[in-house]
Image (spheres, rainbow, N blue to C red):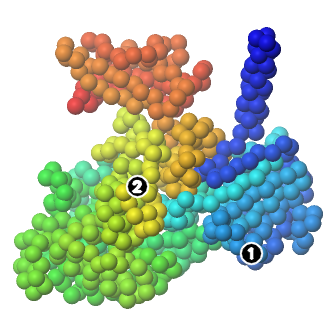
Amino acid sequence: MKKINQFFLCFLFSAGAFAQSDINKTSISIIPQPVSVTEKAGSFKLPENISVYANDANALKQSVDVFSEKITTATGKKITLSKSDGKSTVKFVLNSSNEAQLGNEGYKISVNNNQITVSANTPQGVFYGVQTLFQLFPAEIEGKEIAKNITWEIPNIEITDYPKLAWRGLMFDVSRHFFTKDEVKKYIDNMVRYKYNILHWHLTDDEGWRIEIKGLPKLTEIGAWNVKRTGNFGNFIPTTPDEPRNYGGYYTQEDIKEIVQYAKERFVNIMPEIDVPGHSLAAIASYPELSCTADAVNYKVRSGEQIMDWSHGAPPLALVDNSLCPASEKVYAFLDTVITQVAALFPFEYIHMGGDEAAHNFWEKDEKIKQLMKQEGLKTIPQVQAYFEKRVEQIVVSKGKKFMGWDEILEGGVTPSASVMSWRGMKHGIKASNEKHNVVMSPTDFAYFDYMQGDEATEPKIYASLRLNKVYQFEPVPAEANANYILGGQANLWTEQVYNFRQVEYMTWPRGFAMSESLWSPSAKKNWNNFISRTEDHFKRLELAEIKYSPAMYDPIITVKSNANKELIVTLTPEIEGLDLYYSFDNSGPDNFYPKYTAELTVPKDANMLRVITYKGKKVMGRMISIPVIDLAKRVK
Ligand code: ACM
């Protein structure tokens, strides 16, 4: 009996091992993780001549086009459109009767030896099915040219998938640094791979007004331009009158229409943001009468010099009065003109009107504000802002749109119909949802993609960090919230320290993978180790697609303390499993023959540099991190 058991166990073990390596061979790596995936025996191989059938060619045009383009580019195979489904190799189906489970964005994929079928209730669902389908093919499907020696094979499979949340957004700040029309389109292309459906477009701020408004030409003649500076944004020395103000740009209304249409064809809604009353220096430099402060006639669009003093906490002290004047009727007339045109350009139901970080210090001293407070019975500066927000909401609503603002709009009283974007943690979103405001969760703790994702020695320096693992833990609908009012969530890419589009991509991926999974996939399907393995597969896809990503997940988390002897003690913690760390203090570059990190390190007396490198087995991963010992010392809390 014992013998038989041992034999049986041994068999089970080897069968398990076989199954494992078999899985690795076909390795399904879908991000975001679908609701249900069932792999079947056998596989489908793309024939030389591929026929594509869509049961509603008009409605499914985007899916057919996107599929055909990618397949021809990467495989060189011929695609013909078929009029009947009988012999087609790929079939796109708009369901004739609604499958309730799939909703508006879900889809099904069914692959057998002879045919691929993608079906959904809506064209958007089929489009998402196509995105998943690409991820079933070898990574080379992402290539920009025909890949050689690839077997274009996918496993027979059944997938049923639909999103957890309807609002799956990324915010792109094009004010701090301007990004061209083509770059915005590219950002949209990248988003849709991971089933994002909202682009929150931050179009105005202190550093640039980026949207043409007819009748207000100075917004783009003056407000769209500043002085080109580079380095550590926020601490630049003040500009001088002889420096040319020719850095920046804006989108004409024709550009905006083109981008909105481009996004629409990819099932992305664009929510424009006009950030007022704070963050408005570009508008004020253009039209100084929008400010309460007489000196505004001397103001210039910010080029990255210090503008706020945060040393006293929130709200910050403004060093120049970068807020619109809530006591001026000219401001509401200005906003009416702006919002009328914004409402006409953007079909999406929401307009975001900012509301964040408006400073109090100039308003507190201003006679017109004091007069307004008396006239309107306002007791506090937050009530002054609330008065402003209500007036702005009335304008937005009068144009047939819904009003959204950052969570500061909750201070000083807010109308019941206002929608809230919770950024200073989840607490404001939780409270707002319980008060029946629609809420989008985008808290700094999980969703700020401008924060550093790796060690500060490798990243443009900013005051906070957000590692991949933390984004993956994001749960946009916490138990304490009223789930009926949480529209969804989004990540925000502020671009103060982001000077070019490659860095935009670096900051977005792979944290954008983690965010997409937090917003789309059932919580029960999330698994960190499995996510990392899929992320590695998608790194290869991004490389082939020439999209930059951050390898920071391979970099250790480095913490430093000092002991009783005043020695520096360094701890290296890998973010993901299965990595080995090697280090040096002798200024040379370590490899896998150097000392391996096993326990905290005491920095040797005369050392002046720590270098760390990460390996998986014999393969170097990520990048060498070098930190001068004087910088390590500064990290001691
Ligand atoms: C924000 O980050 N100021 C909304």
* Horizontal side, residue 34 vs residue 23: left or right: left
- Residue name at image x 32 percent, y 77 percent: 416
Element type at marker 1? loop
Write down the quadrant of residue 130 in the picture: bottom right
Vertical relation: 129 (above or below) 507 = below
Q: Amino acid at mark 1?
A: Ser
How crowded pointer 1 is (Cα within 10 Å; few <14, some 14-19, many 20+) is rated as: few
**CA gap, disc 2 and disc 1:** 35 Å
**From the viewer's perspective, is 259 left or right of 58?**
left
User: Is the N terminus in the top left, top right, bottom left or bottom right quadrant?
Assistant: top right
Q: Earlier in the sequence, mark 2 or mark 1?
A: 1
Q: Which mark is residue 97?
A: 1
Q: Is residue 344 left or right of residue 529?
A: left
| Residue 298 at least partly seen | no
Q: Is residue 565 above or below residue 370?
A: above
| Three-letter code for the amino acid on which mark 2 is drawn | Ala
Mark whose residue sits in front, 2 or 1: 2
State which quadrant residue 483 falls in.
bottom left
Give the vertical position of 587 relative to 544 (above or below). Answer: above
| Residue at (63, 68) in percent of width and height | 103
Q: Identify the residue shown where x is 47% and y is 78%.
A: 349
Residue placed farthest to the front in the image?
Answer: 1
Which residue is drawn at the image coordinates 69% and 62% (left, top)?
107
Q: Position of residue 223 (x, y in %)?
A: 32, 72
Q: Which mark is residue 479?
A: 2
**In the structure shown, which secondary structural element does the residue marked by tag 2 occupy?**
loop
Q: Nearer the viewer, residue 327 or 406?
A: 406
